[in-house]
Amino acid sequence: MTEAQFFSKLTGDESDLQRAVNALQATKQPFCLIGGLAVNHYVDPVVTLDADFAVAASQGVEEALAANGFVVEIHPHSINANLPGSRLRIQIAVNSCYGGFPQHAVQAVVFGVHLPVAALDDLVQGKLWAMQDDRRLASKRLKDRADIVRICETHQNIISMIPLGLIAEVDAMRTKDGDGR
């Protein structure tokens, strides 16, 4: 079974992620994948039914998603969408702090879909912001923390981005054997 087939079994639709990418490409606005699916590009994947994207500008995003069959909801800092029958939840961050991420994105294949993924440094910065946002559900903040730890285990050069005292597991990586491992 391919990664794309596996992912489609989870979401219930073979083309939902690809359709979201096609919709975002149609806007001609720079965008990139952020969140858990983006983390899966850099470390061993874990399952998530969220596809989070950052866009440089949100003009045309709602219309492009709707034109591709998505049901769209507008919120103050995000555009949320899903395809009827699919369990994949699309969230487009329209918060200006993520606006620069698309210009640093790398091209990747995530679960069989070719798309821009946030650069590792940007992805970690976004996870740090999300982890420290008290308005988010506690379970989401814990997942962000775990994602940061997973990234630091694989990409030790990222450890220096994490403020000392913020994540005990990362602090332990700094001191173990004196080399971060």
Image: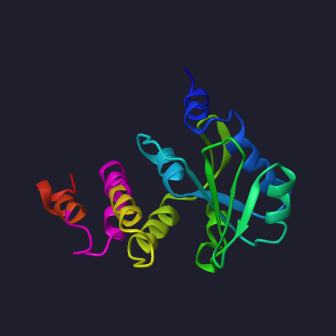
Residue 143, placed above or below residue 14 = below
Position of 172 compared to 22: left or right?
Answer: left
Position of 70 compared to 111: left or right? right
For residue 108, side relative to residue 55 (left or right):
left
Is residue 163 part of the magenta span, yes or no?
A: yes
Residue 85 painted magenta: no
Q: Quadrant of the N terminus?
A: top right
Furthest-top residue in view?
A: 1
Residue 76, above or below 128: below
- Displayed quadrant of residue 172: bottom left
Q: Quadrant of residue 18?
A: top right
Residue 38 placement (x, y as % from top left): 53, 52
Left or right placement of residue 142 versus residue 56 in this view: left
Q: What x and y, as percent, mark residue 96?
A: 64, 79
Q: Which residues are magenta?
A: 147-168
Q: Position of residue 102 (x, y in %)?
A: 66, 64
